Structures are given as C-alpha cells and as structure tokens.
DNA sequence: AAGGATAACAACCGCAAATGT
DNA sequence: TACATTTGCGGTTGTTATCCT
C-alpha cells in the first residue's frame, strides 16, 4: 500500500493564512453539508485549499464551541496532569477539555506549561536529591499520584463538532479508568461533585461547567472588549442560520469576518444572536 | 524610533489508523 | 484479504505581535 498522493501537491493549492472570504465560504458550506467528507469541500466550494487545510481550519478555528483566550488555572491543572499521565496525546487531552482544540492545548503546553512545569519541578528535583522520594513535584499540580485534588469520575467528552475522539477512542478508553482514578484525588471540590459519586452525575456536572464557561466566555468578551473571537461569534451567528434564520444574519457574519473593526459588526450580531452562546449547535 | 529577541498562535507536513471498495 | 483513499494526530515551522534594549 503506497501512500496516497497528497492533496497539497496539486497545482494552485493555496497555503498560508486563511482570509475572511475563505472562512465564509467554508463555514457556509459546512452549514449546508456538515463537517466531514473534507475531500469534497475544496471541490465543491472552489476553495483553493487542500482538504486537510479545510478540516484544520474548521476544527481549530471556525467550529462553534471553541473557547479561546487565556486558559484558567483549572484548565492548566487538567492539562498538566493529563500530560503527565498520557504524554503528548493532545487529542486525548483535548477530549477532556472539549472547548479547547488539541492544537490550542499543544501550543499552550509548548509555550507556557512546559516551562512552568520545568521551573516548578526544578526545586522539587533538588529536594528530591536530599529528601525522601515522595518529594517529587509541586503537590498542587504535577504529581499524578497526588491526593490533594480530585476530578472525580471525570470522563473524556465526545465532541460532536468533530470526530476527533472517534479514532482515538480505543486508546482513550483504555486510559479512562486510570485518568478517572487520578482525577478522583485531584479535581477541585464542589458541592455537587462531592455529592455525586456516579460517572453520569459528575459528567453532567462537568458539562454544566463547560456550558457555563462557554456562556461566560461570550458574555465576558462582549462586555469587556467589545470584540469576540470568531468561533464564538460564528457560533452565535451560525446557530440561527442553521435554524432557518434570515440571510441578513449571515450577511452580518460576512461583514464581521471582512471587517477590520469587528466590534462594530459585532454590535449587530449580538443584537440578533443574544443567548445563543450557551446553546451551541450540533452538526 | 529602530531593530533584535521572544512569545503566541495559525498552519503545514508526514505518518499511521480507519474506512471504503 | 489486499489495496486505495480519507481522516486524524502529533511534531514542526512560519508569521505576527509584543517586549526589550
């Protein structure tokens, strides 16, 4: 079996940053056909992009539900622990943070957390040489066997925007029990988590947190900056479009994507799509 | 103000697994 | 079952923004 010809080899295939126009074409196509069958996307849309590029653009940037911006300390803790347990299985780690993309997590790890861990581990490593073998890492973050926190019953979230977790599911499932056990002693305590012992209850709780976080992201960004990330805005706009809303909504999306001053266009979008943040569409 | 260094993030590349025929 | 094709993943690179001198 030979390796298939790469779509990138084709003549006239565009590379580099995506333009707002291309984003619009891609989003509108996915609105109609849903994600998947990426091979057909450039063929049917006329985008001079390879299928991989289209898929990546969608999954890492355009798809609704993506939370962007600063990682919370809680998210950092999850990433650090999972990385310690799973290694650089970014897709697997991302399945526990469904609002973050694997690319995002990977970038954040490489630019922030790796150094942070290294920095904090250094004193611990020094003390390791002179003290007991239990003093390995910072107790708050980096010891998978630490019993200071709890992520009770935490499970990877199957993200319905992409099929990301499908292919990696077997390996994840094999690790789920270990991760859950790990998190049992890690997750920050919450009243509901303390009372809910079952996986289902905890997963629902986690989902509520995710939903709340998504809602907060939208609200915070709108309120504080007047500018929102495109995925959040797309989510707000695409939802009513998918539900059969008017073409005027989509034209606002176009305006915003094409606009150098997103805050202005967002005023219009927000007026139309208020309340959609916490109700992401499912393709 | 200019230029270099660094950080942050988007995108690409190659491989392997999954899926289709 | 074998092969062809598609998709997903992880590593890496390129570009832009920001900071520092």
Image (cartoon, coloured by chain):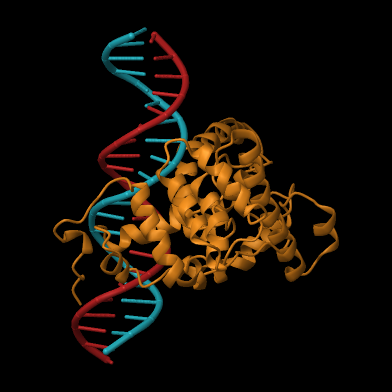
Chain colours: A orange, B cyan, C red
Give left or right: position of A171 versus A207: left
Q: Which sits in the foreground, A179 or B13? A: B13
Which residue appears farthest toward the left when viewing the image?
A: A11
Where is residue A25? Give x, y as percent.
36, 58
Where is residue A195? Give x, y as percent.
86, 61
- Where the N terminus of chain A falls, by quadrant? bottom left
Above or below for A10 versus C3: above
Above or below for A39 versus B9: below
The total of numbered circles placed on residues is 0
Residue A258 sits in which quadrant? top left
Residue A223 makes an appearance in the image? yes
Q: Which sits in the foreground, A87 or A20? A: A20
Residue A145 makes an appearance in the image? no
Q: Which sits in the foreground, A234 or A158? A: A234
Give left or right: position of A46 versus A260: left
Q: Which sits in the foreground, A137 or C16? A: C16
Above or below for A265 versus A244: above
For image coordinates 49% across by 47% down, the residue present is A230
Where is residue B7? Give x, y as percent.
45, 30
Where is residue B11? Give x, y as percent.
32, 49
Residue A138 sits in which quadrant? top right
For image coordinates 74% across by 53% down, the residue present is A150
């Amino acid at each position: 079996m030979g390796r298939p010809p790469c779509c990138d080899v084709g003549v006239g295939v565009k590379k580099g940053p995506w333009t707002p126009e291309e984003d619009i074409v891609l989003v509108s196509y996915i609105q109609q056909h849903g994600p998947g069958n990426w091979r057909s996307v450039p063929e049917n849309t006329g985008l001079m992009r390879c299928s991989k590029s289209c898929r990546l653009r969608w999954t890492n940037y355009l798809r609704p539900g993506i939370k962007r911006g600063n990682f919370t300390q809680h998210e950092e803790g999850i990433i650090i622990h999972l990385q310690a347990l799973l290694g650089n299985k970014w897709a697997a780690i991302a399945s526990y943070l469904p609002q973050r993309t694997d690319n995002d997590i990977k970038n954040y790890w490489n630019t922030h957390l790796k150094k942070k861990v290294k920095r904090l581990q250094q004193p611990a490593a020094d003390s390791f040489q002179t003290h007991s073998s239990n003093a390995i890492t910072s107790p708050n973050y980096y010891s998978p066997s630490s019993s200071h926190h709890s992520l009770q019953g935490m499970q990877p979230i199957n993200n319905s925007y992409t099929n990301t977790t499908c292919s990696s599911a077997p390996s994840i499932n094999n690790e789920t029990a270990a991760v859950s056990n790990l998190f049992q002693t890690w997750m920050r305590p919450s009243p509901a988590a303390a009372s809910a012992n079952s996986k289902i209850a905890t997963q629902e709780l986690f989902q509520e947190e995710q939903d709340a976080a998504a809602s907060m992201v939208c609200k915070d960004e709108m309120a504080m900056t007047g500018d929102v990330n495109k995925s959040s805005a797309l989510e707000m706009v695409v939802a009513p479009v998918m539900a059969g809303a008017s073409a005027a909504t989509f034209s606002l999306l176009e305006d915003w994507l094409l606009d150098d001053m997103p805050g202005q266009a967002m005023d219009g979008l927000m007026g139309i799509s208020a309340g959609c943040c916490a109700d992401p569409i499912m393709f």
